[in-house]
Image (spheres, helix red, strand yellow):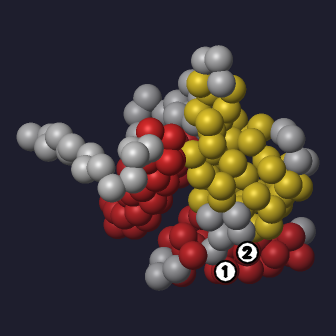
């Protein structure tokens, strides 16, 4: 068990998501973490299901997809070692907003979302640290989705100005 705990701790310390966390906050994450190995082609979760886990990819790749009628899965972002998958655990109603498909055999750190939410509630400093990091991941996901939309619906006529609507 000590070996496993030390491996989990080492994996957490190497994850960019955990950079700058206090020793106490790393211990909180460690306390609700376990390792998962998922084979290529399997899904971590599906859009609309309960977001009950939070993942840090140690090795492998996971693709985030939107299920598009008549098209199948539309890739939004491919995540690899060091990336975070499953940020919906922190935002009510705690439902997945994408499908997460394992693109190659992967090793992940999986954390119990219910425990994390409770720890965030009772320790506002930890909660803020988590929200700050989740907000960064969400911003990166939004940028990735934006780029996918530009690829999909960008102006096919080169040199032609694309009108932009400002949101007020």
Q: What element carries label 2?
A: helix
Q: Residues within 10 Å of mark 2 (few under 14, many from 20)?
A: some
Q: Residue placed at 65% from the left, 24% from the top? A: 71
Q: Is mark 1 on a helix, strand or loop?
A: helix
Is residue 14 placed above or below 39 in the rendered structure? below
Cα gap from disc 1 to disc 2, whole angstroms: 5 Å
Identify the residue position indicated by label 1 in the image: 14
Furthest residue to the left? 168
Q: Do the residues labelled 1 and 2 touch (CB within 8 Å)?
A: yes
User: Residue 122 location, x and y as percent?
Assistant: 39, 53
User: Residue 65 location, x and y as percent?
Assistant: 63, 39
Locate residue 125 relative to residue 144 in the image: left or right.
left
User: Residue 17 location, x and y as percent?
Assistant: 54, 70
Identify the residue position indicated by label 2 in the image: 11
Q: How crowded is mark 1: few (under 14 residues within 10 Å), some or many (20 or more)?
A: few
Mark sitting on residue 71: none
Q: Can residue 42 be seen in this snapshot? A: yes
Is residue 34 placed above or below 68 in the rendered structure? below
Q: Residue placed at 47% from the left, 82% from the top? A: 20
Q: Residue placed at 74% from the left, 80% from the top? A: 10
């Amino acid at each position: 068990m000590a070996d496993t705990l030390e491996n989990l701790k080492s994996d957490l310390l190497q994850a960019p998501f955990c950079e700058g966390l206090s020793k106490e906050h790393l211990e909180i994450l460690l306390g609700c973490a376990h390792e998962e190995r998922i084979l290529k082609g399997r899904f971590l979760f599906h859009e609309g299901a309960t977001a009950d886990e939070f993942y840090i990819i140690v090795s492998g790749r996971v693709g985030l997809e939107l299920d598009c009628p008549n098209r199948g899965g539309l890739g939004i972002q491919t995540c690899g070692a060091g990336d975070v998958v499953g940020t919906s655990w922190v935002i009510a109603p705690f439902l997945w907003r994408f499908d997460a498909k394992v693109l190659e055999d992967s090793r992940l750190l999986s954390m119990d979302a219910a425990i994390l939410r409770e720890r965030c509630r009772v320790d506002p400093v930890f909660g803020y640290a988590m929200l700050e990091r989740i907000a960064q991941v969400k911003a990166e996901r939004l940028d990735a989705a934006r780029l996918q939309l530009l690829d999909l619906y960008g102006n096919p006529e080169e040199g032609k100005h694309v009108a932009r609507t400002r949101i007020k």
